[in-house]
């Protein structure tokens, strides 16, 4: 068994030829030996034209993210046949992700070249017809594949046969394509399994004149320039990473020459560059982009070799400082090295190093973090400060398949945790601390509101997760519809604040025997005996169902060591060790003494 890191070179490929070379190397190594990876994905590619380089570039990008991919490429132009034939290779493959890309020229046929042979009403009618065709295609795919679908919208042409009179039409050709895009987006806005990839924006970003190599297009029906294939695949990774729970939770920020220009310790409060003037505006805009990420749930931390007093003065008093103390979950401002401080931030927030993104203007600091802490993602910040914001906006490490209310409140939740930590310092022992928190735990059966959060927690929770089974929203709904499971969310609050939905239980009910399929808690509520109170709740619930034996499973991963002895410490007996990674535990309900935790109030809804 070989790890991915041993196969890939340190340097990321850049050109499409680099990707082809890396792909050949990977395939050669795969033929020699098995490759060890926790994450795999099955990807289907349905294009209406010739696909060249996508499988290779996307495969390499998956490998660099720690994912071993498997691909299915539909035969040339046969996306409809694959979708509407239940016995197609597509459905036999059963992809986790299906990418559908239909060329606007293929879709419209001669109308693309002669749109004004049709009247306004006929063009409107055609949009309605093509919209219906697309919706039907996506719905049949969604019905027959268990994974997510990414559908390209259509490139709005830059040319109209009417030239400058195009925008004088009641319903012109370009408006026709824009309307089709808009109708498709609205049709799937509330569908958590279907995502519309804004290909038109992708084309605009890279320049619509550069999208196609016309010689290759006419020779082989290749619609995308090979040089842009890696960029397109990077866009695909924005969907794949959250599907595989490769999500960064916290940005670790340097201060001097990163959040402001200059060095506050040398240049002084009045000498740093931050504001609406030409020198300060790049830093001002950079902070605004960072704040927008905070407001969607990304945590922020400071890692600065500086005097704390100098930094706090800027944060608190500078008129153009956008980021304030309350935005930072952890602040490591001292003269320790960046490695020590980065580790301290992870420990302070109680998240893994692999959840951090490190941003620092100093190349030496970046190289040091990359070498010593390879789990941390290091952003290659350009020397030109005007490109800071562009660099940040191009990151796809913060994407999630759903933004929940808990995500939006995350900054405040961790601010509340600071208050708990301060309170903890002033009490005599842990029992006194826990009793003084006035903890309330609410267990609520899954509903339309909580299903997205339940799915998200199964996807991203690693430390206290007994089985680490990953479920999509569709999976959760299917489990509920079976009628054989108790599926519930767990919310926790105390006198310092509301942590929101931070736990999930899925229990399979049976005749006399029940099985805990999923038992997980967010790391931010560990250490308060919530897990014991939740287990006591489960025991009482299954006892009311007439259950005599409760089965608990522990599936070992690299990250869930904190959960390893939970069943052992709560009177379960090991009945089937299986192998070193999979254990089966059993609790005799009648002889169980899972007492309720007296300092936690439990409510069931």
Image: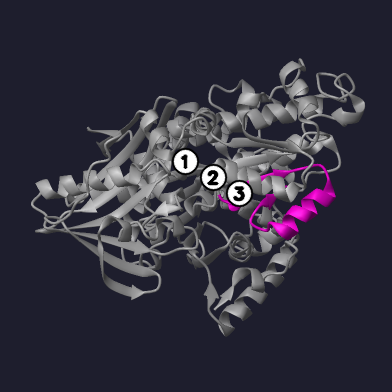
> Any magenta on residue 157?
no
Quadrant housing residue 206: top right
Marks 2 and 1: CB-CB under 8 Å?
yes
In the rendered image, which residue does mark 1 sit on? 524
Earlier along the polypeptide chain: callout 2 or callout 3?
3
In the rendered image, which residue does mark 2 sit on? 350
Q: Secondary structure at mark 2?
A: loop
In the rendered image, which residue does mark 3 sit on? 235
Residue 310 percent location from the top left of the image: 80, 26
Q: Would you say 281 lies left or right of 449 here?
A: right
Q: Nearer the viewer, mark 3 or mark 1?
A: 1
Q: Would you say 134 lies left or right of 14 here?
A: left
Q: Would you say 427 lies left or right of 223 here?
A: left
At 51% from the left and 45% from the top, the residue drawn is 108
Earlier along the polypeptide chain: callout 3 or callout 1?
3
- Total numbered circles: 3
Residue 57 percent location from the top left of the image: 64, 62
From which residue to which does the magenta span run? 352-379
Decide: is 71 above or below 99.
below
Task: Count residues near mark 1 (Cα–Cα under 10 Å), then give few for <14, some for 14-19, many for 20+.
Answer: some
């Amino acid at each position: 068994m070989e790890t991915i890191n041993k196969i890939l070179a340190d340097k990321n490929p850049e050109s499409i030829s680099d990707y082809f070379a890396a792909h050949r190397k990977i395939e050669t190594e795969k033929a020699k030996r098995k490759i060890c990876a926790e994450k795999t994905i099955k990807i289907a590619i349905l294009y209406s034209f010739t696909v060249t380089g996508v499988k290779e570039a996307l495969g390499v990008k998956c490998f660099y993210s720690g994912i071993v991919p498997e691909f299915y490429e539909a035969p040339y132009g046969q996306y409809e046949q694959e979708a509407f034939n239940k016995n197609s290779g597509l459905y036999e493959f059963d992809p986790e992700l299906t990418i559908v890309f239909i060329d606007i020229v293929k879709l419209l046929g001669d109308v693309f070249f002669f749109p004004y042979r049709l009247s306004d009403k006929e063009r409107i009618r055609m949009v309605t017809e093509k919209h219906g065709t697309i919706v039907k295609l996506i719905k049949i795919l969604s019905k027959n594949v268990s994974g997510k679908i990414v559908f390209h919208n259509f490139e709005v042409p830059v040319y109209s046969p009417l030239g400058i009179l195009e925008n004088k039409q009641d319903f012109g050709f370009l408006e026709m394509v824009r309307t089709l895009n808009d109708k498709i987006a609205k049709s799937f806005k509330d569908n958590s399994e279907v995502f519309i990839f804004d290909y038109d924006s992708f084309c605009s970003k890279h320049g619509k004149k550069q999208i196609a190599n016309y010689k290759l297009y006419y020779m082989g029906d290749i619609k995308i320039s090979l040089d842009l294939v890696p960029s397109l695949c990077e866009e695909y990774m924005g969907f794949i990473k959250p599907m595989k729970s490769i999500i960064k939770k916290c940005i670790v920020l340097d201060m001097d020459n990163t959040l402001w220009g200059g060095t506050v310790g040398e240049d002084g409060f009045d000498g740093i560059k931050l504001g609406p003037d030409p020198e300060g505006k790049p830093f001002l805009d950079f902070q605004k982009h960072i704040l927008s990420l905070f407001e969607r749930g990304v945590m922020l931390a400071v890692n600065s070799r500086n005097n704390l007093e100098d930094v706090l003065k800027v944060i608190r008093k500078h008129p153009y400082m956008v980021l304030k103390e309350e935005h930072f979950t952890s602040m490591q401002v001292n003269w320790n090295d960046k490695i020590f401080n980065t580790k301290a931030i992870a420990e302070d927030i109680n998240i893994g190093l692999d959840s951090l993104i490190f941003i620092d203007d100093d190349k030496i600091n970046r190289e040091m973090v990359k070498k010593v802490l390879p789990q941390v993602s290091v952003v290659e910040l350009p020397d030109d400060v005007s490109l800071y914001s562009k660099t940040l906006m191009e990151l796809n490490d913060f994407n999630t398949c759903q933004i929940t209310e808990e995500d939006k409140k995350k900054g405040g939740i961790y601010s509340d945790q600071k208050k708990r930590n301060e309170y903890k310092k002033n009490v005599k022992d842990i029992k006194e601390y826990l009793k003084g928190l006035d903890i309330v735990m609410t267990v609520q059966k899954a509903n339309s509101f909580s299903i997205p959060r339940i799915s998200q927690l199964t996807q991203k929770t690693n430390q206290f997760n007994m089985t680490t089974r990953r479920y999509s929203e569709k999976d959760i709904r299917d489990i509920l519809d079976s009628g054989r499971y108790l599926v519930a969310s767990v919310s926790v609050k105390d006198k310092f604040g509301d942590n929101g939905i931070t736990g999930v239980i899925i229990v399979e009910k049976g005749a006399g025997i029940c099985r805990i399929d999923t038992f997980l808690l967010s790391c931010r509520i560990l250490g308060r005996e919530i897990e014991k109170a939740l287990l006591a709740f489960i025991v009482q619930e299954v006892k009311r169902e007439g259950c005599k034996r409760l089965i608990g499973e522990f599936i070992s991963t690299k990250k869930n060591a904190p959960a390893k002895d939970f069943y052992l410490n709560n009177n379960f007996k090991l009945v089937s060790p299986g192998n070193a990674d999979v254990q089966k535990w059993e609790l005799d309900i009648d002889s169980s003494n899972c007492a309720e935790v007296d300092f936690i109030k439990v409510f069931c809804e």
